[in-house]
Image: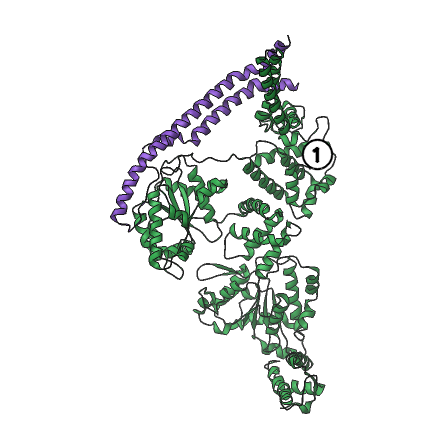
Amino acid sequence: MAAALDLHTSRARQARAGRAIGKTGAGLLTILAVLLVAGGIALIVLHHHYGISLLGLGLLVYMPAAWWQRQLKELPVTGSSFNDRLAVGVLTRLKPKTTYTPRTLWQALTADWQVIFLCNHLLIPGQLVAEVLGDDAAALPAALNAAEQLAADTSSQAIEPYHIAAGLLLSSPAIHELLSKAKLGDNDVRAVAGWLARGLAAMRRERPRFGGIARDWTSGFTPRLERFGHNLSQEIERHSLNFGSLAESQPVQAVTGAFRQGATALALIGPDGIGKTSAAYALAQNLLAEDRDPTLKHQQVIGLDASAIISVARHPGELEYIVSSLLNEAVHAGNVVLFIDDAHLFLSGGTGAFDASQLLLPALQSRAIRIVLALAPAEYQQLKSFNASLAGLITPIMLKEPDEATTLEILADNAAGLETHSHCLIAYEALKEAYRLSQRYDQDAANPGKAIRLLEQSLSHADNGLVNAASVQAAIEQATGVKASSAAPAEADQLLHLEDEIHQRMINQSRAVSVVSNALRRARAGVASPNRPIGSFLFLGPTGVGKTELAKSIAAVYFGDEARLIRLDMSEYQRPEDVARLLSSGQGETSSLILQVRQQPFSVVLLDEIEKAHPNILNLLLQLLDEGQLTDSQGRATSFKDAIVITTSNAGADTIRQKIEQGAQLEDFEQQFTDELINSGQFKPELLNRFDEIVLFRPLKPDELAQVVRLMLAEVNQNLAKQNIAVELTDAAINKIVEQGNDPRLGARPMRRAIQRLVEDTVAQKILAGAANPGDKITLDAPDLSS
Amino acid sequence: MLALTLLSWWYRPGWAKVGRDGGRQLQALAASFSVAMLLRTLFAPWRRIISYPGAGMGAHLRAAVDNAISRLVGFVVRIFVLLFAVVMLVVTAVLTGLELVAWPLLPPAAIILIIWGLV
């Protein structure tokens, strides 16, 4: 049935009466009632007959005050119909004699803080919404139905102002268009409504009471635990913390259930950021409210910080004494569940760690203590391998990374606290961006922790107190160097003229430069697939024609630093066992591709002489190009989605040289050349097909080599600039260098040595002989060059 | 109209709410004083004393004696708290009962008293 507003109901009248009386009015009425009753009694005592009337009047005045206090203040929902469920916030803002349209209804509610919250977090101006919403009263029932549905979705009995406002947004096609322009959809409106609903529920929740005055009178004193630990249960009580949904989640229920079934030692297992500590808090909350198992009722969860304890002890003996004292206190207190964060520090004898397993083992075997350990999956595996008896006593509870919707809810709930502390407004788009970017660029941690961390970092990038998607992008750019934001006008201009930038560093190879530039523009504009490397290229051509130089240029121009080049000579990976070396994640393995990319994900990966690599490595390359990631020897994925992968090969170099010498253009024989490479068995078709582009490099002509000489001379002049000396070469000198430095088989590669021998040596002699002084410009002609 | 709304609330949900609020107050009082727990642990020691590892026989003996004394201390403290809780509960229950009786009489009483005083 279509919902319709009825503002003449008893509930609506009560809401308006409640607003008319208000908190101050109710207070004044109560005081007046007390004065009248007291005055009446006094007059009666003094035998004044009017005192009786005054007493009656006092009682009469008390009635509306009691009404407000016990009913009107909150006006609970009493019926199930739409109008019976309208919240006070709606009823007091609407006038009974007005006929509302979507626009006027929005305007009536727009001053309500809930509607302001909705608009602020969606970044949509309320005024603009009012302009877009129409005056068609026939469209109102759809909006009210949407509001009623949203109230059901957010498990709200009352239909609040934000439900009506969101209903208006969701039901209007014109608003839909407005939201689309702001990259928002219906689900985002519903998500922000859910965020508000959870916040309201938290605000209205009564402060829980966990046991009374005598609760802890029978438990033992725990002075050392108070010194070295922090009481999670106490924190929940003192600060009214609520881990509601987490407390109800499957893993925390599993922990509570395991304790009920008699388990004494549990391990929360999951990667960093997954919420092991939060799960411990949720467990603490469950135990405070426990009513099924009397032995668990009112148990206190006390967290031990392993690293803090280790840092306090001056020698191993003292550390052992502290740990055994803490265990002893926990056993005798009778109401303690120990939670050990970073438990691996207590269970291994490595650097900065202490092996407390010999102390824990008897305590766990005697079942005298309840304990919860927090471990990463690898740490738990390590415990199983090295201390099977201890691991056998521990019940593992695996924590799973939450999905996107749940992570966004957790992020929103955390954002509320961040907003209070930072006095910033965190837009919903910032939450989505924090999830997206942390998921993409933080491979080391899990959600929701990594997204929360990124959101916290974004606070320092707030613009006029607003944290939006750009703030999150700026935070990740600062932290990792990745280009996450849209290209700014200056950068867009640079991208549009990428070829010019690259040609300042290398001569010709225009086709190669052009295809690479196109790929980079596609990636930066967000057109390319985000699940593959930014670009993948196979550079083919003779030695010394600029393949490596182009890779370096890309690193310098696109990533801003030539050092962002990870270069591997694949001729060193010809044996099957070399695969392991490439994928090793062990410390100190400098040649590991995985480690280098993990340290520097935003880089050009240059794999030289790919045809010489073992076939197993070429199979790995297929996975890399397809999925944008490789998995290391420990099963951890490393993303190559922010890297540009360039492979080079000299295969068919002679063919290219011959064809070019015969006067052919690269474009004329590119396809035929690629087919020949496949037919000759040098490359598998499935590998060649996976590259974004196969780029042919042609040998350099003498006039291009002369330009290479000029580029190299510029480098020489750069070095001499410190001594304020400059060198210039005549055309004859350049021709002489080209003549001596050119080798058809090695391209421009010998040119560097020719410059050293002919130019740098000559200049060095002149400087040492005093023939070149600061401020001089040395001009060298062909005969001047020492040979 | 508003007066009728008030009266219809006064004699139905209002009266029931007085009873509910009174019951809630009694429950909250009983929970704050942890009456059930006080009764269950009446003879339990008043905070246990713990002897630490390696503290020796003397310390263990001392802890045992201290614990025995603490049972006596615990009993005295708990019995006094229980007595105070019972007094509070009785007072609250009586006040709630009086309010429940007086509540329906209040509107007619107010009118009657006003008229009576004027006559």
Image coords of residue A576 (percent x, y): 44, 69
* Chain drawn purple in the picture: B
Please determine whether, in this image, residue A716 is positioned above or below residue A375. below
- Which residue does the image show at 64% across and 18% down from the upper left? B3
Please determine whether, in this image, residue A296 is positioned above or below residue A718. above
- Which residue does the image show at 60% across and 40% down from the upper left? A193
Residue A369 shows up from this direction: no
- Which residue does the image show at 51% across and 19% down from the upper left? B99
Residue bearing the label numbered 1:
A108
The colour chain A appears in is: green
Please determine whether, in this image, residue B86 is positioned above or below residue A49. below
**Viewer-proximal residue among A552 and B12:** B12
Question: Farthest residue toward the left?
Answer: B57
**Viewer-proximal residue among B89 and A621:** B89
Please determine whether, in this image, residue A658 is positioned above or below residue B91. below
Residue A500 shows up from this direction: yes
A360 horizontally vs A138: left or right = left
